[in-house]
Amino acid sequence: MNMKTLNKFSLSRNKALVAYLIVLLLMIIAPLVIKDAFILRLFTTTYIFSIVCFGNMLVVGYTGMLCLGFVAFYGIGSYAGALAAKELGFGFLLSVLFAGIVAAIVGFVISLPCLRLSVDFVGLITTSFLNIFLAIARNWRSLTGGPNGVTGIPRPVIFGYRIASVTSFYYLMLIFMVLSFILLNNIIHSKYGRMLQGIRDNELGAVSVGVDSRKMKIFAFTVGSLFAGIAGSLYSFYISAINPDNFIFNISTQIMQMCVLGGMGSLPGAVIGAAFFTVVPELYRSLALYRIGLGGIIMVLCMLFRPQGLLGSRAFAGDKGFADRIKRARVVAQQKKAAAK
Amino acid sequence: MSHFLEVEHLKMYFGGVKAVDDLSFYVDEHELLGIIGPNGSGKTTVFNGVTGIYKPTGGKVIFDGKDITGQSLRNMVYLGISRTFQNLRIFKAMTVLDNIMIGDTKNNHSNLFNAVFHTPRYRKYEEEARQNALEILEMTGLTEYRNKYVGSLPYGMQKRIEFARAVVVNPKLLLLDEPAAGLNSKEAEELMELIIEVKNRKGFTIIMIDHNMKIMMSSAERIVAMETGQLLAEGTPSEIQNDPDVIKAYLGEG
């Protein structure tokens, strides 16, 4: 019996591993096949946003807190990384680490007032925090450069190798994305992941088996903003000039949309969501004005037909999806027919 | 005088409402004590007061010789008390196995570093937790559902999962809040058989709330009857069954 169970475990894990490796291989060879710089840049942006989504997923998808101002941590990391490299003369890796730690500390502080509140009010707190962050970024000219932001961020140099070309940026972001994925995936499949998900599904139930929900919520917020900060600094190195408009509320909504579409509680889903909302808006670029509205329509359709998102667990959806209702109606009709016969 | 769990003069007031008023009872080790009473008589509030969900207004709870009055719910697991809830509090978007494995948190001493890098220490504890959970699943007859999401399983199964989760923390005292509520009589009987079997195997002490008199009479060793937050009667099932006060509380005056 036990042998059989163990086999089954390793089998399903192996299957996932094979799928991951295939996708990774495709990602690695993509620049060799695709020579179009524009498309490669889209992928590069996707990887950066994937890392932010990982962080958001940890807070929202795994712990069940609503963080509507998540872009603030991304922005803080962005500014911290850029200023560390430009003003303090830190090297690239050190700047990224510095940015992550600064964002994590801020995330830690923000998580404290969130502990006593219900989900909706956590959303409000984080939204207001985003506004505070934007106000500071726009007005503290001596540090942040005000509305003009920080420009002339130096190109990253790693072990003497200067990263400037489209392809080298692509690989740099891919490496960071894959590393973040592995680290978070390990956390989520450990007891920490179980505790977080327990809090998400039923906080009192989790506490009753000995989970310290306050500690775990702080943990989720801190680690989530750590990854957001890292992604932010990568972004600033990538586009070499940042300003407060890169971190407005719309971007926060977009991050949330990516997570919802990809599937709450699924890390690969975060990558898919990030890819979707990075690539698809380019396809209807001519409709740029309606961009946000189209995003909304996609969200509504997602809620109707696949409430759990593309890769999310079925259990999130219950049976409230539109497609489920049709299916149920059909089953009921069939039963009636059978009864009539 | 020293019982396994002693509740002395427990008072739980919410504003002017005296949900539990000066209630005293005890449980001995390896005993199955039933608590009965009409709706709103304060049975669940007693559980909430004992397990620290609410702080008692007055009175004492003494467990295994220690005063545990007002300790937090989280600490209960470390003291050796676990409970189930009247309205299921399980993790619907997690698999059955994960629902049970989460109960092993207190024995799992791997730290974050171990978890992030999947060190041998992490693997050791994870494997221990898995074996422990599989053993409980086997015992509760849930093995074949272990990879299913809990939200997709029928209600009776979910009740069983919550019971299994309370068992996996290996408590000394188990508080079951209406384990048979919402189940049909066959399911309820099966669950009770399971509870008794697990109790005998693990040597638990159990306090159980339920409305189902048939189940209570057949499984409880002693029964405490409550009404409007106060002790109405206490005794063996047959004593309770024939107690005029209890009959009056349930059926009204004849």
Image: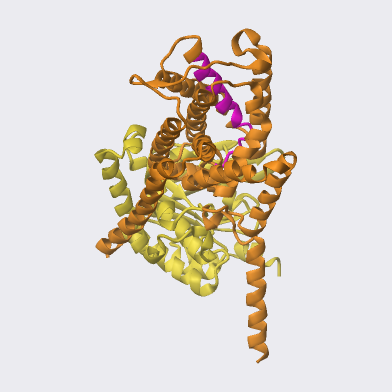
Chain colours: A orange, B yellow
* Quadrant for the N terminus of chain B in the image: top left
Residue at the limit of the structure toward the bottom, as seen here = A341
In the image, is residue A19 above or below residue A206?
below
Q: Is residue B57 left or right of residue B76?
A: right
* Quadrant for the C terminus of chain B in the image: bottom right
Residue range highlighted in magenta: A64-84
Q: Quadrant of residue A292?
A: top right
Report if residue A82 lies within the magenta region.
yes
Image position, residue A146 (x, y; %) = 66, 14
Q: Nearer the viewer, residue A242 or B59?
A: A242
Please indicate, yes or no, whether residue A137 appears anywhere in the rendered image: yes
Residue at the limit of the structure toward the top, as seen here = A142
Q: Is residue B204 left or right of residue A68?
A: left
Identify the residue at image location x=60%, y=30%: A71
Image position, residue A241 (x, y; %) = 57, 20
Q: Nearer the viewer, residue A302 or B93?
A: A302
